[in-house]
Every structure is written in C-alpha cells, then in structure tokens.
Amino acid sequence: MNDRAPAPGGLALVEALVNTVDLESGADTLDTAEGRARFGIEERDLTDVRRLRESLRAACLAHAGHPPHAPVTPLGELLAAAPLHVAVDERDGSATLVPADGGPLLSRVAAAVAEALTAGTWDRLKACELPECHWAYYDRSPAGRGRWCSMSVCGARAKMRRYRAKGT
Ligand SMILES: [Zn+2]
C-alpha cells in the first residue's frame, strides 16, 4: 500500500502488475474483469500472469537485498520467451526494444524492463521488506536504500515489532 508517485516510464506497468494483489488480505484485482482489462489479459492467462507477477516481485525484493518470498520461476527464464524486436526510427536512427505482435503482457513487461535498464531505473523498483506487504515501490531516496513501501505504515509497523521484540 502506498501513497508514492508511480514508477517512471514503462516501469509503472511492472509496479502496477506486482501490486494487483494484497498479500495480507489475498484480494487480487486480477480476479475481476476490470482488473484484467487494465492489463489486456483474459481469464485463461491468469496462471501465467500470476507466475510472472511473483517472479517480478522476487526481482523487486532482490533489488532491496532480500531473498525471494516464495519459490518462483526465475524472471529471466520467463522473459526469454517474450517476443521483442528492435524498432529503429528512420529520422534520427534512435532504436528501442518494442513488443512484437501488438504486445502480449509478457512482451510489454520485457520491453519495460529493457527500457528501465537503459534509463538506469530497474534496480530502484523494489519490494517492501515487510512479509505481509511486499508491495512494489519505486525507491526515490538519494542513497537508494529505501526499505518500506511507506515509512508511515510499514516502516512504523517494523519499528513497533522491533520494539516489542526487545521488550520480551
Ligand atoms: Zn509495505
């Protein structure tokens, strides 16, 4: 849960996908037709999309120095199947990786990761360290050492927990 501005560029798609499920309540917006329409997916895609979502979450956790929250398929393995091609602008010769075939979600995610690599933003997309949260957020702190999606919610919960642990 957070009140932060969305991640920059295509990373906002990755962030939004990771944050379709509330791990604490189990509420998953991909269970609804509107939730799926937002990502251009169908009900039959759900198994694959959820697998992709948790692999992305594990990568976000890794960016913050944490181990995976669950056994996941390595993200690189999933993205290797994404049809992408290099588009070159004839006017200025600039090139970008774009999803092939109008962009299935997997390819749009792969293109977003490629774009973020170029922009130097990929490793700033992190997941909150609180196990019941693990919400994705974009770390804008100058040193890049953010730990929680929200200082006032998860940061405060973590501090309270440490305080209680000391008291016992
Ligand atoms: Zn959090």
Image (spheres, helix red, strand yellow):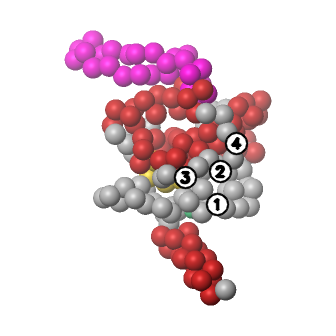
Work out whether 148 lies above or below 125. below
The residue positioned farthest toward the bottom in the image shown: 167
Of the residues under marks 1 and 3, which one precedes in the sequence? Answer: 3
Answer left or right for 65 relative to 78: left
Segment tinted magenta in the rendering: 78-106
Give coordinates of residue 123: x percent, y percent: 42, 44
- Measure the alpha-carbon separation of dots 1 and 3: 11 Å
- Measure the alpha-carbon separation of dots 2 and 4: 7 Å
Q: Nearer the viewer, mark 1 or mark 3?
A: 3
Q: Which mark is residue 131?
A: 1
Amino acid type, residue under disc 1 in the picture:
Pro
Q: Secondary structure at mark 1?
A: loop
Residue in the picture at 55% in, 29% down: 76
Answer left or right for 139 relative to 103: left
Q: Residues within 10 Å of mark 3 (few under 14, many from 20)?
A: some
Q: Which mark is residue 71?
A: 4
Q: Which mark is residue 69?
A: 2
Give coordinates of residue 111: x percent, y percent: 47, 28
Amino acid type, residue under disc 3 in the picture:
His
Mark 1 C-beta closer than 8 Å to ligand 1:
no
